[in-house]
Image (cartoon, helix red, strand yellow):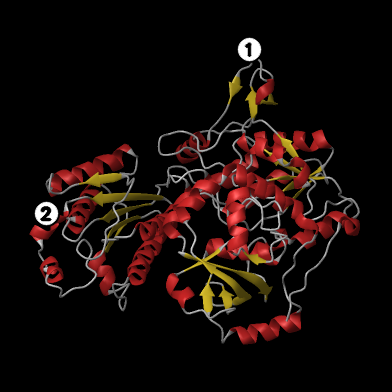
Amino acid sequence: MNAIVAEIVSAEHDALVPPHGGVLRDLYLPPADAEALKRASASLPQWTLNQRQLCDLELLLNGGFSPLQGFLGRADYDRVLADMRLADGTLWPIPITLDVSEAFAANLPANAQISLNDTQGTPLAVLTVADIYFPDHVAEARTVFGTTDRTHPGVAELLDRTGPVYLGGTLQGIQQPSHYDFASLRHSPRHLREWFGQHGWHRIVAFQTRNPMHRAHRELTLRAAEQVGAKLLIQPSVGRTKPGDVDHYTRVRCYRALLDHYPRDHATLSLLPLAMRMGGPREALWHAIIRKNYGASHFIVGRDHAGPGKDADGKPFYDPYAAQHLLAAHQKELGIEIVPFPAMVYAANRDTYLPQNEVDAEDEVRDISGTELRRRLHSGETIPEWFTFPEVVNILRERHPANAREGFALFFTGLSGSGKSTLAQAVLARLLETGSRPVTVLDGDEVRKHLSKGLGFSREDRDANITRIGYVASEVVRHGGIAICAPIAPYAGARDEARQLVQAHGRFVEIHVSTPLEVCEARDRKGLYAAARAGKIKGFTGIDDPYETPVSPELRVDTSQRSVTEAADVVVAWLKNQGLA
């Protein structure tokens, strides 16, 4: 059974630009073949896709990642890192890889087929494995992101949460991933190209966003479309964006409200199930290629496109115009025209928005940052109409009601005997003594007894235990509560996974209880260190299994240097300073 490769050339839809590489790769099988492969997939090795892999698979199968026909093998991967090209020379800046555990890869025979499933166990595609290889994640971070600083969300995921083995090979699509939200706004490249053809749209400028849009964004997109004589495609990323971003449900409601403020039949909205890497210039190039596959002839590239902000030293990861320069250098080969645009600012004296490079010295420029907007939403303070539209404000206020208390998780981590649980109990008492907010305690031993009963102490089981803690904590935080977690959590990757889960809904406060090993061992209230030294316990953290020290926790407390009361004072004072207690 071979996947249908649908060839779409520019002649098919008159003036629409051809897909990247000239062919739109639709990798879904015909219904009868897909049903047969679905039945056969039950006997294959099974791999459950994470969120990034699921987004990548969807765009591979529907042609959004044309000309790719599967996950990259070693030759393509190496060339993408070195030259931003596939092995055959085609321009492609971001590695699209399927990472798995070493244990899973070790059991695969040559030319194995594996079933790629969603979290419900539904088979979505079969991968015929042509390549199994061990990447150098640090080298990948340096070449793709230009840094190994874990403050960069793409770097943190790559170094701490990405499997050590990559599988390359071709895909056969069984069925589309299920989406139960905004179904009418989810289009494949083929469907969107057909819609453009039916409505006579031939020049289309696409706009990428991961944030709510306000008046400045409307002005920017209107001017960009007018500048090139094109219709506007607003195509926000709704797969995975930067931790802490406004959820896509709220954003899409805002986009819908904004559409009414564009000229009739001038703009349309379509959702892109993209897992962003926040890779700056390389990602901007990737975004342009994807929009080309969806039929756009032009692409807006703004200031600091797909940049994640500042590094650990407070410096921007990327030059604000590096993306525009990179795309300009590949303009001819790229096959989609770039529309570079400066930031739009509001000049109060003129009561209008202007490109930043058109502002005069006498202009009274006003702006509201994302931080300031969140503050006003929280306090109930007025948000001026020059900044955004009332309909958008109403939607944001519904999602972020005034004076609502933000949920947060306190995640105490450290060696056995470091004082994590004792400190957590002391902080709990202080919070309950001075407030009335609901608090849930997820102590390591108690979680092991109830939530994680049956798990052992292998690395995989320990990671699963922390993920479960992170999930429960995220639910507590989502409902505005406080979660206090006190596991050993020895591995950085699992701690970061817990952080990602919680930060989708609120604050994650990592507190490294940094009491030295010799002090913890001297305490040894449970006799665990003695048993480990005697060889009676294997894989004990700090003795014959590593504890990966947190690099940049929100707080670091050594209970050998402070009493429990003093340490609790430090934690509570920090929380008050952050407005959390």
Q: In the picture, which quadrant includes the C terminus? A: top left
Q: In the picture, which quadrant includes the N terminus? A: bottom right
Residue for badge 1: 362
Q: Position of residue 549 (x, y in %)?
A: 28, 52
**On the picture, is 404 further left or further right than 245?**
left
Residue 87, picture quadrant: bottom right
**Residue neighbourhood size for the residue with mark 2, other residues' Cα within 10 Å, grouped as few (<14), some (14–19), many (≥20):** few
Name which residue type carries label 1: Glu
Q: Position of residue 12 (x, y in %)?
A: 89, 59
Residue for badge 2: 519
Name which residue type carries label 2: Val
Residue 259, picture quadrant: top right
**On the picture, is 467 further left or further right than 440?**
right
Q: Position of residue 110 (x, y in %)?
A: 56, 79
Q: Nearer the viewer, residue 12 or 254?
A: 12
Residue 122, picture quadrant: bottom right
Q: Secondary structure at mark 1?
A: loop
Q: Position of residue 133 (x, y in %)?
A: 52, 66
Q: Is 269 rendered above or below residue 176?
A: above
Residues under labels 1 and 2: Cα distance? 64 Å
